């Protein structure tokens, strides 16, 4: 019996494989294996003489399939090797159900099994179980069971409806997670906002509440910008001192540009509420047109149009003056005609008034005017070289004709290149060989502390070292800071000079600090200071600003706030805040009709007095 089975197996292999010339050595596919199994089964079982014609049971079919597989592929019998081999085979059978199903499906395609398949049997009992050990021939050792997570073909052929259902469920889960994430973020934001809100002081919370009510209930729309500007304006005007102020980004840029000496327009400023010229910017169109401080601008015409008066009757016997507003806001290149009078703010006479024409443009202002020996000088900015050039400006100003027997130096503001211009003026003073210098600080409202420090380097007679204090600041926090002049240049330019200082009620801040440094270092005494007296009482004083401002810039928004931060003291410890430099301390009153008369009769009187003393 055993020999017959072995003989049939040999014949099956010979029929199936041995006599196939040119058989391919390529790896066999599942279809190849199924075909080989069917052919092997036919050879093994179909030609058995006397084989029973009884219907085959599931166990018979399983045994035939297993024996065919053993012949073809060398699969071991569970009985081979005794109990140990049987246990190994049992484990392999359970792990390899998918492979057994494929082999059995192929075997079912033989003529003997088609009838059973056509009866619709979907699952065969005993699939994957080991056949009886007594019916098995010795086989090679079993291979280890496969443990990979390979999906079965049944799983791979999962109905599309099921896949779509599972995909839809996953999409719903993703949406729910996204919604949950958004709600969580909103909750975190709300928690952070309300935590921040309740950390604010009560005043700010009230302001925010007030704005919310206005936004929601007020009968007209109030923009956020207008609301906050009004709030800032209220603090600025109602709470802070007159020197502290808020700057919008545009205002800050305009202020910084102006402090650098860059302006656009005609170059005129006016006494408040009048059409009387307060100052003419050196280097501006008005300067080169010959306009002088103290003149009245009684009419303005634009682009060849009609001349319009700059004074309007207010119905009460007085006038409203519009010169300043009429000359603001012109585009660069605009042609402007000015009607000027030296006698009256309402003068329109052809014989008494004169007309000048000029062009609006951007210019660089100079802050020092020097006159001596019949000439006047200023450092004018040249666009082509971008440098200040010491220039004879006698044709544009009358001061050169006034100044006799002394040198005159007018310092307008502590801005821009004023310190360098001051040095050029002293170079000219040294060259002229003059012995008396009149330093005019009238209407100089101050400016940069750094510029004051640089100018003070020329004006300290008794300085013991190059670097000495010219100002001390005491801040609200209690901090004290000293400001120094980094050089001592007095002996180089003014060693044998007599210095006189002119001041008035508009002389303030850095101007007063410079006078204080000169007094502290013995350059001048109080009796060398001449202060404008407009009432003839013999009593006069400078402005009296002995505090300092610091500008704080918001680097993110570009806005800024200038705040009063410190009280300032001269090197000798004097603070003139609220009092100024006065005639009561020994300064001289200087009679004048106002702080800016045309032709400057006050300067003429001082020059005459100095000439008489000599």
Image (cartoon, grey):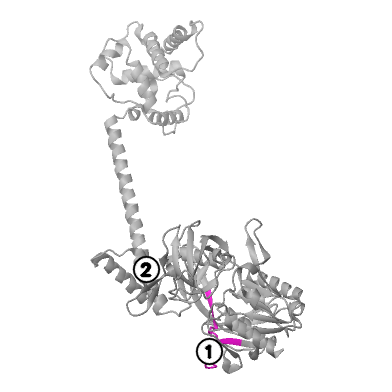
Residue 200 visible, this orientation: no
Q: Which residues are magenta?
A: 530-550
Q: Closer to the observer: label 2 or label 1?
A: 1
Q: Residues within 10 Å of mark 1 (few under 14, many from 20)?
A: few
Of residue 482 and residue 605, the one placed in the foreground of this image is: 605
Classify mark 1: helix, strand or loop. loop
- Circles 2 and 1, Cβ within 8 Å, touching? The answer is no
Quadrant holding the N terminus: top left
Q: Does the magenta-highlighted stretch encompass residue 32?
A: no
Most prominent secondary structure in the magenta stretch? loop
Relative vertical location of residue 174 with respect to residue 81 in this rendering, above or below = below
Quadrant holding the C terminus: bottom right
Q: Give the numbered dot on residue 579.
A: 1
Q: Is residue 542 left or right of residue 211?
A: right
Q: Which residue is mark 2?
A: 228
x and y percentages locating residue 71 in the rendered image: 44, 15
Q: Residue furthest front?
A: 351
Residue 193 picture quarter = bottom left
Classify mark 2: helix, strand or loop. helix
x and y percentages locating residue 344 in the rendered image: 46, 76
Residue 584 visible, this orientation: yes
Q: Give the numbered dot on residue 320.
A: none
Q: Is residue 492 left or right of residue 545?
A: right
Relative vertical location of residue 68 with respect to residue 604 in this rendering, above or below = above
User: Could you tell me how many numbered marks the image carries?
Assistant: 2
Of residue 540 and residue 203, the one placed in the foreground of this image is: 540
Give the residue displayed 61% in from the left and 93% down from the top: 586
Q: Earlier in the sequence, mark 2 or mark 1?
A: 2
Q: Residues within 10 Å of mark 2 (few under 14, many from 20)?
A: few
- Marks 2 and 1, how far apart at CA: 36 Å
């Amino acid at each position: 019996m055993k020999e017959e089975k072995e003989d049939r197996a040999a014949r099956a292999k010979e029929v199936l494989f041995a006599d196939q010339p040119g058989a391919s050595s390529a790896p066999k596919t599942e279809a190849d294996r199924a075909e080989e199994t069917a052919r092997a089964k036919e050879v093994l079982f179909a030609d058995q003489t006397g084989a029973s014609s009884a219907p085959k049971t599931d166990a018979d079919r399983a045994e035939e399939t297993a024996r065919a597989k053993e012949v073809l592929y060398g699969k071991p019998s569970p009985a081979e090797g005794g109990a140990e081999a049987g246990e190994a085979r049992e484990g392999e059978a359970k792990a390899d159900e998918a492979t057994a199903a494929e082999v059995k499906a192929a075997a079912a395609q033989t003529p003997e099994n088609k009838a059973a398949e056509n009866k619709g049997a979907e699952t065969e009992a005993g699939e994957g179980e080991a056949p009886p050990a007594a019916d098995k021939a010795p086989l090679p050792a079993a291979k280890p069971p496969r443990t990979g997570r390979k999906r079965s073909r049944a799983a791979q052929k999962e109905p599309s409806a099921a896949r779509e259902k599972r995909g839809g469920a996953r999409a719903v889960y993703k949406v729910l997670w996204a919604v949950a994430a958004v709600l969580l973020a909103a909750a975190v934001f709300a928690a952070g906002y309300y935590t921040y809100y309740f950390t604010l002081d009560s005043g700010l919370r009230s302001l925010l509440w007030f704005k919310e009510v206005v936004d929601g209930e007020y009968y007209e729309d109030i923009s956020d910008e207008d609301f906050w500007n009004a709030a800032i304006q209220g603090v600025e005007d109602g709470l802070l001192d007159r020197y502290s102020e808020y700057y919008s980004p545009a205002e800050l840029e305009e202020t910084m540009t102006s402090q650098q000496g860059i302006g656009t327009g005609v170059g005129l400023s006016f006494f408040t509420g009048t059409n009387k010229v307060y100052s003419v910017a050196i280097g501006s169109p008005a300067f080169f047109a010959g306009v002088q401080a103290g003149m009245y601008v009684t009419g303005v015409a634009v682009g060849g149009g009609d001349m319009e008066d700059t004074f309007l009757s207010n119905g009460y016997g007085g006038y409203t003056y519009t010169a300043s507003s009429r000359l603001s806001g012109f585009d660069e290149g605009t042609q402007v005609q000015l009607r000027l009078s030296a006698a009256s703010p309402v003068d329109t006479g052809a014989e008494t008034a004169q007309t000048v024409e000029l062009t609006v443009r951007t210019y660089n202002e100079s802050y020092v005017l020097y006159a001596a020996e019949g000439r006047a000088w200023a450092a004018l900015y040249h666009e082509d070289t971008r440098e200040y050039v010491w220039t004879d400006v006698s044709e544009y100003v009358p001061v050169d004709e006034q100044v006799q027997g002394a040198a005159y130096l007018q310092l307008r503001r502590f801005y821009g290149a004023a310190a360098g211009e001051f040095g050029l003026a002293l170079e000219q003073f040294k060259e002229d060989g003059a012995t008396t210098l009149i330093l005019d600080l009238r209407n100089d409202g101050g400016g940069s502390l750094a510029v004051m420090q640089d100018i003070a380097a020329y004006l300290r007679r008794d300085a013991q070292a190059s670097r000495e204090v010219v100002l001390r600041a005491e801040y609200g926090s209690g901090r004290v800071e000293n400001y120094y002049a980094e050089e001592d240049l007095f002996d180089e330019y003014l060693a044998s000079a007599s210095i006189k200082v002119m001041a008035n009620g508009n002389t303030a801040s850095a101007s007063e600090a410079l006078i204080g440094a000169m007094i502290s270092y013995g350059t001048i005494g109080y009796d060398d200071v001449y202060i404008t007296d407009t009432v003839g009482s013999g009593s006069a004083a400078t402005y009296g600003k002995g505090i300092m401002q610091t500008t704080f810039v918001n680097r993110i928004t570009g806005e800024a706030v200038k705040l009063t931060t410190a009280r300032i003291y001269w090197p000798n410890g004097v603070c003139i805040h609220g009092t100024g430099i006065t005639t009561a301390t020994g300064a001289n009153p200087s009679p004048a009709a106002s702080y800016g008369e045309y032709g400057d009769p006050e300067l003429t009187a001082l020059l005459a007095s100095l000439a008489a003393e000599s």
